Amino acid sequence: MKQKSHSGAKKRIKVTGTGKFRFQKAHKSHLMAHKSKRAKKLNKSGQAVNAADKRNMARLLPNY
């Protein structure tokens, strides 16, 4: 039987060319007026998945 990718993970996690998993951090869609410039700047870029979680991500996305 074919393994299926996790639908929620497909939408939220991207795999880089070197095989690392990247995701977008939360708390940046609205209510930004009261957040500091530094907090908004640091939250702008994506973040690599922690090494401890990499195995779980690979299980969620077997075909990537």
Image (tube, helix red, strand yellow):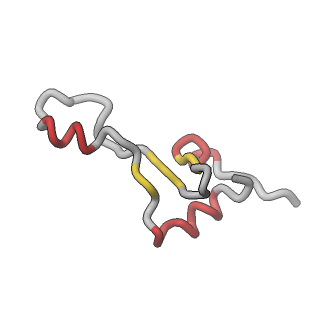
Q: Is residue 21 above or below residue 7?
A: below
The structure residue drawn at horizontal position 78% and vertical position 58%, both measured from the top left corner, is 3
Q: Is residue 7 left or right of residue 32?
A: right
64 or 8, nearer to the observer: 64
The structure residue drawn at horizontal position 54% and vertical position 48%, both measured from the top left corner, is 13
The structure residue drawn at horizontal position 11% and vertical position 32%, both measured from the top left corner, is 34
Q: Residue lying furthest front in this view?
A: 18
* Location of residue 26 by image quarter: top left
Q: How many marks?
A: 0
Q: Is residue 43 above or below residue 18?
A: above
Q: Quadrant of the N terminus?
A: bottom right
- x, y percent for residue 57: 57, 61
- x, y percent for residue 49: 46, 59
40 or 29, nearer to the observer: 40
* Location of residue 33 by image quarter: top left
Q: Is residue 27 left or right of residue 22?
A: left
* Location of residue 10 by image quarter: top right
60 or 15, nearer to the observer: 15
Q: Residue lying furthest right in this view?
A: 1
Q: Is residue 26 left or right of residue 37?
A: right
Q: Is residue 7 above or below residue 33?
A: below
The structure residue drawn at horizontal position 53% and vertical position 55%, both measured from the top left corner, is 21
- x, y percent for residue 40: 22, 37
